[in-house]
Amino acid sequence: MKSFWLSIGLFIALIMQGKAQVLIGQITDEEGRAIEGATIYIRETMQGTVADENGNFRIHLAAGDYSLEISALGYEKQLIEWEITEKEASLSVRLKPIRYMLKEVRVIGKGEDPAYYIMRNAIARAPYHRRKVKEYFSEVYSRGNFRIDNLPRILKWGKTGREVFDTIKGKTLLMESVMDIKFQSPNRYKRNILAFNTTIPEEIGPEKALNVVTSSIYDPDILGILSPLSPGAFSSYKFRLEDSYREGERMINKIEVQSKIKNNRLWNGWIYIADEEWCVVGFDFSYNVKGFSAQMQVGFNEIAAAIFLPTSYNIAIGMDMMGLEGEAKYFSSVKYKELQIDTIQLTLATEDTSIRKRAVSKKEQKIRHKIQELSEKEDLTNRQAYELARLSQRLQEWPLSDSVSPYQIPLRRLKDSVTVDTMVTKRDSLYWQKIRTVPLLEEEIKSYEGRDSLRKFMEKVFGPPDTVPNKADMIFSKIMLGDTFALDNRKRVGLEVGGLWEIFPQYNVVDGLWIGQNVQLHIYMNKGKKISFGPSLYYGTARKTLLWKMNANWLYAPMSRGQWELDFGEMSEDYGHAGEGALFENSIS
């Protein structure tokens, strides 16, 4: 049962001084409709929060004067000066739709959409924006809730299965957490979980606290999906300049992002980029595969001069596949406590290297000169944009090997360490009431009220939850689901075996039941490259024949998903491409 709840928890994660006063408010449009996902940013405290589905928010602040930035994608930003004096102050804000001015945008005389000019500059400077923040220290409040409307029939078998389903059907379950995050450029995150609370019947540990805030739009991928600002994005995405508008002295471009091919690792939606600075000021992306959908809105604010960082996250997830139906919502509010800018990054395009206090080689001088030369061009080509991104990254991570491919920036793995405060699960209701930036919804309040009775029911049915996975469970999991076994001490060669789960992978009316196995040998190389090859061999009980395939795959460009693949053999395939989910459900049925 533990694996079941852990799977559900991962599902919602795919796709969380002075005398304190309370500022509560609601954000609506001109017609009074709530604006879900609107961002409220307090300049003095560098704190952001997000409005819930009813447009509501709440922030605890010390008495004093504050400047509030109220914004939402598609609406004009409002700046409100507000004095906090009473114990509880209320604020109601109505946002106006943005008045766009696309006709004033310069059109490039190439017969292409102006979005490509903007995106070339944004892609070229993505490494610069990723690295110009040297360090920051932030406090993050996250909350995710989900509801299960249906389960696969196999999980509803028998009296116990029906009782469990009837107990959880339509009920809201949630997790919420508070964590401190210490970021150090380029890719190191240290998370300290300060508080964690959940109404899931079997405990998911605090280390599972939702951590989407450790992703960046300037990284090659966002939550495992290719970023539109990654090197090689033009081969996977097409762009269209939908609108432009002024926000103070800046021109903001709203660009539609569309995937060129049907791929489950590509986004669709909109990205907002500031002219001339070529930095992201917000995005609204969606992700859809058969039976699964996710939408992620991220609000940015100017934390320091020309430094835009995420201050709010709003994510909605829906699932309807293999009999599992449900939906989830997640949001996160970020408060920046410390911020350190890398002054070296702010002088990338100059020849002045005195601040490095070291001898500069002729090769580095040549790279700096090339960066300056490309930066001064008004209209970059796709090739020049990729080249500028590569050179900027190389200079920032100097020295790098000369073996770096012209269009491949080395893939840096995220270094994420987690510690848990001793008081993490002992915070009282007063603490949570103070720390929450969005009030609990009615169904979330009911979820907390019914938590104890739901857990008692689950313990009665399945017994007390396991606190530590035992060795027998781990061995059983490997036998059932398979595993990859290292064949050398350096773990550069691995053998992947499918496990019992893959012995009977599917059933169809043509072949009958498949009985067999697949094996893959993986050779792991530098910079994320990998070579894999191995056979799949099955026996079809209806056709009474062997089904076999030999596969060879070379992942030579991890950043742009560049790979070479060769398959040969004799296998059956669904002509309608129904997908693995449908084949599995058909086999169970």
Image: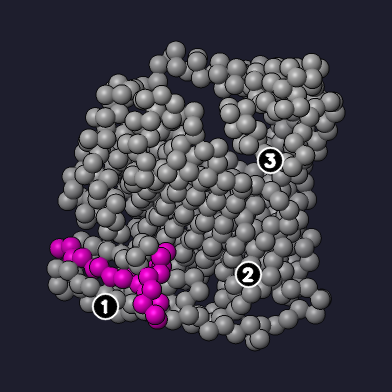
Distance CA(mark 1)–CA(mark 3): 56 Å
**Residue at x 38% of width, y 57% of height:** 334
Up-down: is 70 above or below 248? above
Q: Earlier in the sequence, mark 3 or mark 2?
A: 2
* Nearest-to-viewer mark from 3 and 2: 3
Instruction: Indicate whether residue 326 is drawn in magenta.
Output: no
CA distance for labels 2 and 1: 33 Å
Q: Amino acid at mark 1?
A: Trp
The foreground one among 210 and 323 is 323
- On the image, numbered disc 2 is attached to which residue? 255
Q: Name the residue: 80% across, 27% down.
A: 571
In the picture provided, is 448 more to the left or to the right than 222?
left
User: Distance of mark 3 from mark 2, alpha carbons?
Assistant: 32 Å
Secondary structure of the residue carrying tag 3 is loop
Question: Measured from the top left, where is residue 197 in percent x and y?
Answer: 29, 42
Dot 3 alpha-carbon crowd within 10 angstroms: few under 14, some 14 to 19, many 20 or more: few
Dot 3 corresponds to which residue?
A: 578
Q: In front of the other: label 2 or label 1?
A: 2
Q: Position of residue 544 (x, y in %)?
A: 79, 16
Inspect the image, locate mark 2, and give the three-letter code of the amino acid beneath it.
Ile
- Closer to us: 355 or 336: 336
Residue under the image location 64 percent in, 48 percent down: 265
Span shown in magenta: 19-43
> Where, by quadrant of the figure, is residue 66 drawn?
bottom left
Q: Are marks 3 and 2 in contact (CB under 8 Å)?
A: no
Residue 483: x, y in percent? 59, 21
Q: Does the CB distance between marks 1 and 3 fall below 8 Å? A: no
| Of labels 1 and 3, the one closer to you | 3
| Residue 395 seen in the figure | no
| Foreground residue among 2 and 343 | 2
Left or right: where 280 falls relative to 441: right
Colour setting: one colour
